Image: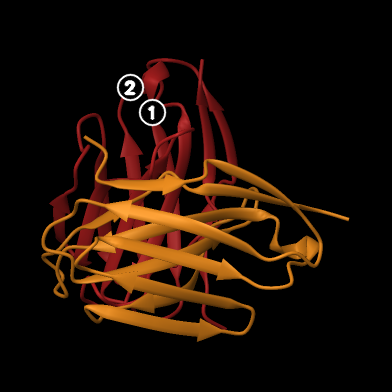
Chain colours: A red, B orange
Amino acid sequence: DMKVTQMPRYLIKRMGENVLLECGQDMSHETMYWYRQDPGLGLQLIYISYDVDSNSEGDIPKGYRVSRKKREHFSLILDSAKTNQTSVYFCASSLGDNYAEQFFGPGTRLTVL
Amino acid sequence: KTQVEQSPQSLVVRQGENCVLQCNYSVTPDNHLRWFKQDTGKGLVSLTVLVDQKDKTSNGRYSATLDKDAKHSTLHITATLLDDTATYICVVGDRGSALGRLHFGAGTQLIVIP
């Protein structure tokens, strides 16, 4: 069963707290992504990971960092969360290249108060 | 600057009617274009991908066209069902390789009423 999972699904944090968003996939996909989705905007790429410990910044990496120690697992970390990081965060994975279909997780709705 | 524009922003149709969603883009180069469906509170699910200069695809009640000269794509939904209620997102890939980027539209919110 091809699946991308995200935990938690909902999270409320106070400004300045640290946030850890987890993503897992069971398809042995090399490439994984973190996006955020805000109302009225298209998804924006935060980070892309090409494989274990091979991560690159996306279009809006400021305020975020990532960790990929196993191929099936990709974490997004917010050190000292800010209110403007309130958003819905999506993880995705694909077989490798840009053309390959991306499989998306269900999203994590993060609210920073 | 937004490189992928979708119209209309939202659309209400009655069950059984057909509808057409539009996607205009300025992404260059434009390697491929993919349409996704996003149910409320869920992730994106791919409906179809278009690759050729002038391309057409069909997937059940969904059909799509791409004209790279015009940088324009359409998604047709035939005989809409209540379950078609969702946001439809147009995504343009600027490369076929992993070095490329995907450019996302903001989506068209489709509501199908009985």
Question: Would residue A48 be found to the left or right of residue B34 on screen?
Answer: left
Are the residues under badges 1 and 2 in a single subunit? yes
Rounded to the nearest angstrom, the CA distance separating label 1 from label 2 is 5 Å
Question: Would residue B86 be found to the left or right of residue A4 on screen?
Answer: right
Q: Is residue B69 above or below residue A79?
A: below
Q: Position of residue A63 (x, y in %)?
A: 24, 29
The residue pinned by badge 1 equals: A18
Measuring 55% from the left and 62% from the top, which residue is drawn there?
Answer: B37
Question: Would residue B110 be found to the left or right of residue B108 on screen?
Answer: right
Instruction: Identify the amino acid type marked 1.
Output: Asn
Q: Which mark is residue A80?
A: 2
Q: Nearer the viewer, residue B18 or B89?
A: B18
Q: Is residue B6 above or below residue A41?
A: below
Instruction: Identify the amino acid type marked 2.
Output: Ser
Chain designation of label 1: A
Figure quadrant of the N terminus of chain A: bottom right
- The quadrant where residue A46 appears: top left
Crowd tier of the residue under label 2, counting other residues whose Cα lies within 10 Å: few below 14, some 14–19, many 20 or above: some
Work out whether mark 1 precedes mark 2 in sequence or the reverse, and give the earlier one: 1
